[in-house]
């Protein structure tokens, strides 16, 4: 299944806007975690060929899914929110709901930049591992110098 093309800048802009609105209601670790990861996303935009930047952004965005669930579940109040706070909470929840989809798009970008599979499970099929190094061994099996002497009529010497 081919994913539609989504620009990394668009993902950053949407999550920045939703996080900013989420900060109306949630303070403390919520903005720190989300804005830090968005800063890593800006690094991934600036260095288009960097696998490290996009992989850190992907890992950080996946981590903020867990952190947002914890933070929203602890600090969300069922009653007592004003309309503005309810709006901020809704935007934080919308950002949380969009993050898995964003992770799929970012993983696709990670693979386009040359990243390997993050999880390699052997039973899913043949390995697609690539190496940057060529082997210097010849394609034929190496010969053992001690095996050849017995096969040529030479007898081992006893002591």
Image (cartoon, rainbow, N blue to C red):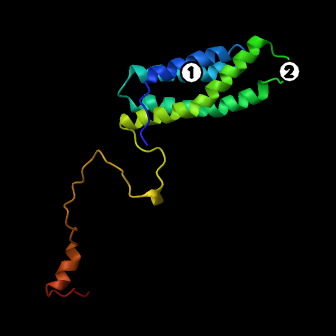
Residue depicted at 72% across the width and 31% down the height:
70
Q: Which residue is mark 2?
A: 79
Residue situated furthest right in the rendering: 79
144 to the left or right of 26: left
Q: Tag on residue 15? A: 1
Q: Position of residue 42 (x, y in %)?
A: 47, 19
Residue situated furthest left in the rendering: 152
Q: Position of residue 111 (x, y in %)?
A: 40, 38
Image position of 56 with respect to 30: above or below? below
Residue depicted at 65% across the width and 14% down the height:
21
Q: Nearer the viewer, residue 39 or 94?
A: 94
Q: Nearer the viewer, residue 51 or 7?
A: 7
- The answer to whether residue 78 is visible is yes
50 to the left or right of 37: left
Mark 1 falls on what kind of element? Answer: helix
Q: Nearer the viewer, residue 105 or 114?
A: 105
Q: Quadrant of residue 74?
A: top right
Image position of 137 with respect to 1: above or below? below
Residue depicted at 38% across the width and 55% down the height:
127
Mark 2 falls on what kind of element? Answer: loop
Q: Tag on residue 149? A: none
155 to the left or right of 100: left
Q: Position of residue 123 (x, y in %)?
A: 47, 60
Mark 1: few/some/many CA within 10 Å (<14, 14-19, 20+):
many
Q: Quadrant of residue 8?
A: top left
Instruction: Of the two numbered discs 2 and 1 on the same chain, state the one appearing first in sequence.
Output: 1
Tag 2 near tag 1, CB within 8 Å: no
Image quarter where the C terminus lies is bottom left
Q: Position of residue 26 (x, y in %)?
A: 72, 18
148 to the left or right of 79: left
How far, Cα to Cα, is label 2 from label 1? 26 Å
């Amino acid at each position: 299944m081919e994913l539609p093309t989504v620009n990394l800048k668009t993902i950053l802009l949407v999550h920045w806007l939703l996080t900013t609105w989420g900060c109306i209601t949630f303070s403390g670790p919520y903005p720190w975690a989300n804005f830090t990861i968005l800063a890593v996303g800006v690094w991934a935009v600036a260095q288009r060929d960097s696998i490290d930047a996009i992989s850190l952004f992907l890992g950080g965005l996946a981590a903020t899914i867990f952190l947002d669930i914890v933070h929203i579940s602890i600090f969300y109040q069922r009653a007592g929110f004003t309309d503005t706070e309810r709006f901020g909470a809704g935007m934080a929840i919308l950002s949380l709901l969009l993050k898995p989809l964003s992770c799929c798009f970012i993983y696709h970008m990670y693979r386009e930049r040359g990243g390997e599979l993050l999880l390699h499970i052997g039973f899913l099929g043949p390995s697609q591992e690539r190496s940057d190094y060529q082997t210097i061994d010849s394609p034929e099996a190496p010969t053992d110098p001690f095996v050849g002497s017995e096969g040529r009529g030479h007898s081992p010497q006893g002591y």
